[in-house]
Image (cartoon, rainbow, N blue to C red):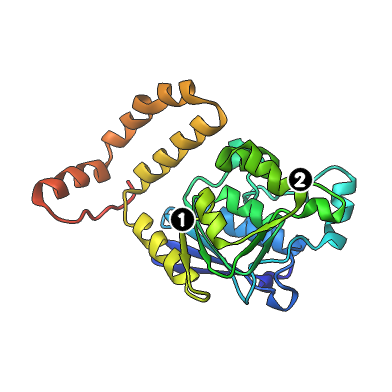
Amino acid sequence: MDNSKITVQKEGHVLLMGLNRPEKRNAFDVDMYWGLAYAYGQLNNDPDLRCGLLYAQGDHFSAGLDLVQWAPYFGEGKMPEMPAEAIDPFGLDEDNRLSKPLIMAIQGITYTYAFELLLTSDIRVTASDLRLGQIEVKRGIYPVGGATVRMFDEIGWGNAMRYILTGDEMGAEEAYRLGLVQAITEPGKQFDKALEFAHKVSKQAPLAVQAALNSARIARVQGTKPALARLLPDLMPIMTSQDAAEGVQAFIERREANFKGY
C-alpha cells in the first residue's frame, strides 16, 4: 500500500485526512481506499481524537474512481477486503461505521465516490468552484458506495434521481440550496472553514457528541420509533460522566466547559 496517497495528521483533538494524488486529480485507487480506511480506523479508535476532517490536495477534490483498479472487484460483486482495524469510508456496514463526527472540505471536480463520501460526512464545506457529480451512469456503471440509498434522504427522491440518473453536475450554490453543503467559501478557503467547524465540534463533550450522532443515525436508518426509545436509556450512562458534571459546573460558573471525554 502506498501510504503517501493519504496524509494523516493530528491537530489537537482533530484528525486531518488528506487525499494526496493531485497529479491524477485524486483519482481514487485501491491503495487510497485502504489508506483512508486505516485513517478512519485511527480516528474511530483513538480516545484522544474527537472529530475528523477529510480534504484533498490540489485544485480538485477528485475526478472519481480509478476504474481500471476497481473493475475487477466490481466484476466479482465485492469491495476490497477490509482489515479488522479499519473502517470502511463508504459506511456500507451500518453496524461498523465511523462513530465520531466527520467534517468534509471539497473543491473543484468532486465526482462519483467523492460525492458518496460527502453523503457519509456530517458537516460539509465547499469552495465556490465546486463541480459535484454522481456521474457513474456516464461510465457504464451505477453508484455502489451508498448514493442510491442516502442521497434521496438528503435532498428528496426527485432531486436525487435527477442527478443520479442523468449524471449532471451541480455547482456550489445548488449544493447549498439543497442542503448538501453547509458553507461556501472562496477557492482555497474551504479547508480553513472546515477546520473551524472541526475544532468547534471537538471542544464539545465527546460522549455527548457521539451519542447525539448515534441517535440521529438510528433515526435515519431504523426509523423514528427506535430512536425515540433509545433517547433516555442512552443518556443514563452519560449522566454519570465527569463531563456531565463539568457541563453543569461550567453553566453555574458561567464559563466555557473543559471536557475530557470521560
| N-term mark: 1 or 2 | 2
Q: CA distance from mark 1 to mark 2?
A: 25 Å
Quarter placement of the N terminus: bottom right
Spot occupied by residue 182 in the image (x, y as percentages of width and height): 46, 55
Label ID, residue 226: none
Q: Is residue 9 left or right of residue 169?
A: left
Eye-nearest disc, 1 or 2? 2
Kindly identify the residue that appears in the image at 24 percent across and 41 percent down: 244
Spot occupied by residue 170 in the image (x, y as percentages of width and height): 63, 58
Spot occupied by residue 73 in the image (x, y as percentages of width and height): 85, 50
Q: Amino acid at mark 2?
A: Leu
Q: Amino acid at mark 1?
A: Gln
The residue lying toward the viewer, choosing from 219 and 86, is 219
Residue at disc 1, secondary structure: loop
Residue at disc 2, secondary structure: helix
Q: Which residue is mark 1?
A: 182
Kindly identify the residue that appears in the image at 47 percent across and 64 percent down: 184
The residue lying toward the viewer, choosing from 153 and 69, is 153
Kindly identify the residue that appears in the image at 37 percent across and 55 percent down: 201
Q: Residues within 10 Å of mark 1 (few under 14, many from 20)?
A: some
Q: Residues within 10 Å of mark 2 (few under 14, many from 20)?
A: some
For the residues bearing labels 1 and 2, Cβ distance under 8 angstroms = no
Res 210 visible: yes
Label ID, residue 165: 2
Q: Is residue 106 left or right of residue 257?
A: right
Kindly identify the residue that appears in the image at 49 percent across and 30 percent down: 219
Report the residue that reaches farthest toward the left. Answer: 253
In the displayed structure, 169 sits above or below 78; it is below
Spot occupied by residue 84 in the image (x, y as percentages of width and height): 66, 47
The residue lying toward the viewer, choosing from 151 and 216, is 151
